[in-house]
Structures are given as C-alpha cells and as structure tokens.
Image: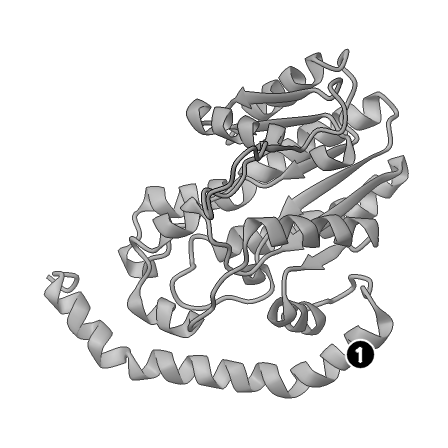
Amino acid sequence: MVQKGAHVSIVARNKERLDQALVTLEVIMPLPSPPATNVRSQENRLNPNQKLNAYSFALDTAAESSKALNAACEAHDGHAPDAVFACAGSSKPKFFLEMSEDELANGMVNAYWVQAWTAWAAAKMMVRQQRKGKILLVSSTLGFMAFLGYSSYAPGKHALRALGDTLQSELMLYDIDVHTFFPPTMVTDGYMEEMKTKPAITHEIEGTDPGMSTEHAALVVFRGIQKGQLHIAGDLITNLFRSCSRGAAPRNNFLLDTLYDIATWIAVPVWRMMVDKQVKNHRDEHLEYLRANGFFD
C-alpha cells in the first residue's frame, strides 16, 4: 500500500516490532550479499507527504480496538480510513483434551474477536462519516475445513468467515466492501510459535507444505480486493476447499470455480479418507501418550 502512495497506519502490541516494521515500510533494504558498493536502499514511499505511523494497542476488546482506530485517524483529521485490514490473530495447536479452559476461551478471542472488534469499530466510523470504504478480515484455509489439533483456532476462523459473509450483505447498505482472506500456512514468527505445541500427528497431516511468504500473501490480497472477491483464497488447495464450501457466497470466476467444483467432487472425499486413516493409525500411540502424561489418573 505504501508503494501505491497510500498513508498507512499499523497497530500491534509490541512497540519494538512496530518500530522495526516502520523501517520496512519506509525502505526496502538491499540484500547483504553479494557485496555491492554505492547501493542505496530503495524507498517504498512515492512522495514525502505520505504519513506512515505505528500505534501500540491490544485489540482483544471493543474499547481498545476503538481507541486504536481513533488514534490512527487523529493524524488524518479524524477521517475514517479508506481501507481497514484486520490481520491480528494467533494459534496454539494442541489436543482438545489437553487444553485448559483459558486456552479454549483465549483461542476464540485470538482467532475471532481480535478482528471482529476492529471491523465493528471501523464500520461504525465509516457509516457515521458517510464514507465508502473496504474492510478485510483474515481467516485461514481452516475457515473452510478443520482437523485434529486446531479445536481452539478453527472455530474462530469459521466464525470470521460467517462474519465476513454477513457484513458483505449488510454493509452494502453503506457502500462498504467486505473481503475475507483465507491464507494457507504462512511462514511467520507466529507459525514458529505454533510449532512449539503442535502435535506430531497434526504436523503429519499438514505434510511438507512449504508455506506462503507474507509478501506473496499481501499480493494475493491486493489482487483479490481489486477483483472484488468476497472470499480470497491463498493457493490452489484453499481454492478447492473454498469452492466446495462456498455455500451462498458468489463465485470468484465462473469457469474456474466450475472446474474446482468438479475436481473437489473427487479430491475432497479422498483427502478426508486419508486424514481419517492417519488419525486412526495414530490411536494406539496417542492413548499411550495420554497414559504416560497421567490423563487417566
């Protein structure tokens, strides 16, 4: 967005990471190798008048989300943003039986409410100011399906899909466009944190997915919004699940979605059988794991 000439404000909790992100928004640093002389960093800005700001807020409550939005808008005379990208969220994959009450409750906050409150605050501000705008929510491939290990995460991502579909219908009353992005695995610090608790069987089901880079994800989102897609899929596999789980959502492309429909009629049942087989084969090992950890005591 900065490279397109936009003013950009970013919100997160960690001030140090926000400061680092601002540097990235300002310039693209040259690669450290091979060594080069007289190479300057490439500026992302199109002009010096672009406002790039960062704000430290937690977004897990309605009050804090509203404060964050108001703070970001102060630099623009209180005007509502043209576009709001709600990207916050985190996952802690574990077996359902091992999760605590707090982990299950926080899973819904981190996967759903942390974005829903921002969308709520943004929609109200846009409507009150009678400004057209765009709101993007970030769900996951797990917003179309789910499997072992994601019982605290997938429900929230399914809920985000439902919120996006509902808001797309309601906010057209005010000329506000709503989009939901469904990325596959993305290689981020959050993903590395997930790996600390992710069950081995969950990792096995996911296979050798190399993941999507954040740069590629941003480009997919930008193009999806340009095309007016309600559901923006991150890769081919997600597109297949999107197509067979579309419900009443509009098609992104009539021809491609028809081909996806045909492919998923065979592919998805096969995938489901393979996953179920992997889980069942893991049963004895899992029961022994529970015994070793005192679950039955």
The correct choice, above or below, for 187 with respect to 23 in the image is: below
Q: Within the image, what quadrant is residue 206 found in? A: bottom left
Vertical order, 113 against 193 (above or below)? above
In this rendering, does residue 10 appear at all?
yes
Q: How is the image coloured?
A: one colour
Residue at numbered disc 1: 258
Q: Secondary structure at mark 1?
A: helix
Residue 2 in the image: state x and y as whole percent: 70, 33
**Quarter containing the C terminus:** bottom left
- Of residues 104 and 50, the one drawn nearer to the viewer in this rendering: 50
Quarter the N terminus occupies: top right
286 left or right, relative to 132: left
Taking 237 as reference, is 40 above or below it? above
Residue closest to the far front: 37
At x 67%, y 38%, the residue is 85
Residue type, label 1 = Thr
Is residue 1 visible in this depiction of the protein? no
Residue 118, by quadrant, is: top right
Residue 52 in the image, given as x and y percentages of width and height:
65, 22
295 relative position to 113: left or right: left
Residue 20 position in % (x across, y down):
48, 28
Give whichever of 123, 239 is nearer the camera.
239
Q: Nearer the viewer, residue 94 or 207?
A: 207
Q: Residue at x 60, y 71 (%)?
A: 237
Q: Residue at x 57, y 62 (%)?
A: 141
Identify the residue shown where x is 82% and y is 48%.
169
